Image (cartoon, rainbow, N blue to C red):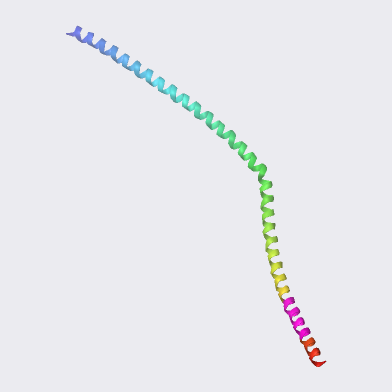
Amino acid sequence: SSGINAEYGGVAEDEEIQQLEMENDNLFAELTAVSAEVQNIEGTVVEISRLQEIFTEKVLSQSDQIFQIHQTAVETTENTRSGNEELREAIKNNAGFRVWLLFVFIMASCCLLFLDWYH
């Protein structure tokens, strides 16, 4: 009976060893795949970092141009506002001039009609 247990115990121990070796191989394969993924991600992060540095350099180099464009836009807005005010004033002045011109023509016509009637 003890010989049978020793015999079965050896077989069970061999099966456990084989099972552990299979699990070990599976874990090794899984860890190898994870390691490859980590290296791939690391390369991607390095590339993103490099591109971010390039982007930052480009933004900083264009900041002066962006500021100049902003200043030009502000000046253009002010010039447009001032131009609109000048146009309004010119329209008002022109309307007053038209009224005086019309008054002069009417008075001249009346004088001519009076002189023609009187003569």
Residue farthest right in this picture: 119
Question: Is residue 26 positioned above or below 1 on the image?
Answer: below
Q: Is residue 93 magenta?
A: no
- Rendering quarter of residue 73: bottom right
Secondary structure mostly taken by the magenta-highlighted segment of the chain: helix
Q: Position of residue 30 (x, y in %)?
A: 40, 23
Of 91 and 70, nearer the camera is 91
* x and y percentages locating residue 50 in the rendered image: 59, 33
- Residue 114 in picture, x, y percent from top left: 78, 90
The number of numbered discs placed on residues in the rendered structure image is 0
**Which one is in front, 53 or 97?**
97
Quadrant containing the N terminus in the rendered view:
top left
Q: Is residue 7 above or below residue 57?
A: above
Residue located 58% across and 37% down the image: 52
> Residue shown at 20%/6% (left/top)?
3
Instruction: Identify the residue shown where x is 73% and y is 73%.
Output: 94
Viewer-side residue, 7 vs 33 = 33
Question: In this picture, which residue range is highlighted in magenta?
Answer: 96-109
Residue 4 quadrant: top left
Q: Residue furthest bottom?
A: 118
Q: Residue 22 vs residue 67: left or right?
A: left
Say left or right for 4 vs 39.
left
Point out the residue furthest to the left here.
1
Residue 56, image x, y percentages: 62, 40
Query: Quick one: quadrant of the C terminus?
Result: bottom right
Q: Please say whether residue 102 is one of the residues in the magenta stretch.
A: yes
Q: Quadrant of residue 25?
A: top left
Q: In the rendered image of this protein, does residue 46 appear above or below residue 8?
A: below
